[in-house]
Amino acid sequence: MLQVTTMKNYLKSDDKNEVYCFRSNCSEQMTSEKLIKEMIQYNSTLTEPDARAAMSILGELVERYIAKGYDVELPFCWIHLSASGTCETLQQSFNPDNGDNKFGIKFQMKKESKNAIFSSAQYEQIESTFVCDPRLYSLGVVNDDSSETNVLTISRGKILRVHGRNISFDISDAKQGVFLGTGENAVRLSSYSRIGSNIIDVVIPSDATAGEYKVKLTAKPGVGRYKSDYLDSILTVVE
């Protein structure tokens, strides 16, 4: 669902008008895997291999023809490649590896699709906060076969997966990162295999003290301020 929040409008210098503004964030993701399952449930005659094949072929063809310079039509939009940048003379050639010359992607939503989305849009008003602040959603333990379990018992040397939004951080800053514990004695974890805005994979160190912990994440989404979030879920570290 679309989550709408109210925040200070820092782009407005007038203290009397438009002091606050609305910002939003999507609380869930529709991944390719989820979309395949939805396609199967939507049409009972469509098998999982059919859905996977259709998704794969569509993805390859769209990328191929966008790269060739086509304006590609999908049921709900048009997508095409674009070029931008500057040059010193009329004779100078466009070079995407030179200066500000670069490729971009132009996306144009079809009017009828846009109207259909707006007319049935679902949203909720949430507590006022900064939409860029980190928020933790869940924890998982990565198994040896790369699968993930929500059984929160983890051995030293194994990978803890943290799910959330706006959770990327500057690893060079000792105040930022994933911590075992939420108090003054919280232990900062230092070995990461992935640091993304929605998923972080962090290794439990070999010298971690066995016990039960809450997991905290601290990031610095704005100038001069650190923001933290933690989950009530208990992570058990074992030898």
Image (cartoon, grey):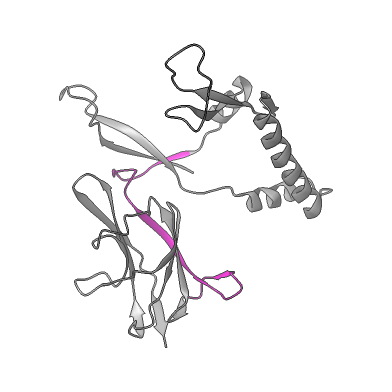
Looking at the picture, tell me which residue is in the foreground, 117 or 36: 36
Residue 57 shown left or right of residue 190 in the figure? right
Q: Reply yes or no: does residue 184 show up in magenta.
A: no
Please report the residue visible at 47 percent of the width from the left and 77 percent of the height from the top.
158
Looking at the picture, tell me which residue is in the foreground, 205 or 48: 205
Residue 224 shown left or right of residue 38 in the figure? left
Query: Which image quarter: residue 128?
Result: top left
Image mark count? 0
Residue 199 shown left or right of residue 82 in the figure? left
- The span shown in magenta is 123-151
Query: Which image quarter: residue 105?
Result: top right
- The x, y position of residue 159, in whole percent, is 47, 72
Considering every residue shown, the one lying at the far right of the view is 45
- The x, y position of residue 181, in whole percent, is 29, 72
Q: Reply yes or no: does residue 143 show up in magenta.
A: yes
Considering every residue shown, the one lying at the far bottom of the view is 239
Considering every residue shown, the one lying at the far left of the view is 15
- The x, y position of residue 45, in whole percent, is 84, 48
Please report the residue visible at 77 percent of the width from the left and 44 percent of the height from the top.
54
Looking at the picture, tell me which residue is in the foreground, 136 or 62: 62
Please report the residue visible at 42 percent of the width from the left and 81 percent of the height from the top.
156
Query: Which image quarter: residue 8?
Result: top left
Position of the C terminus by quadrant: bottom left
Residue 199 shown left or right of residue 224 in the figure? right
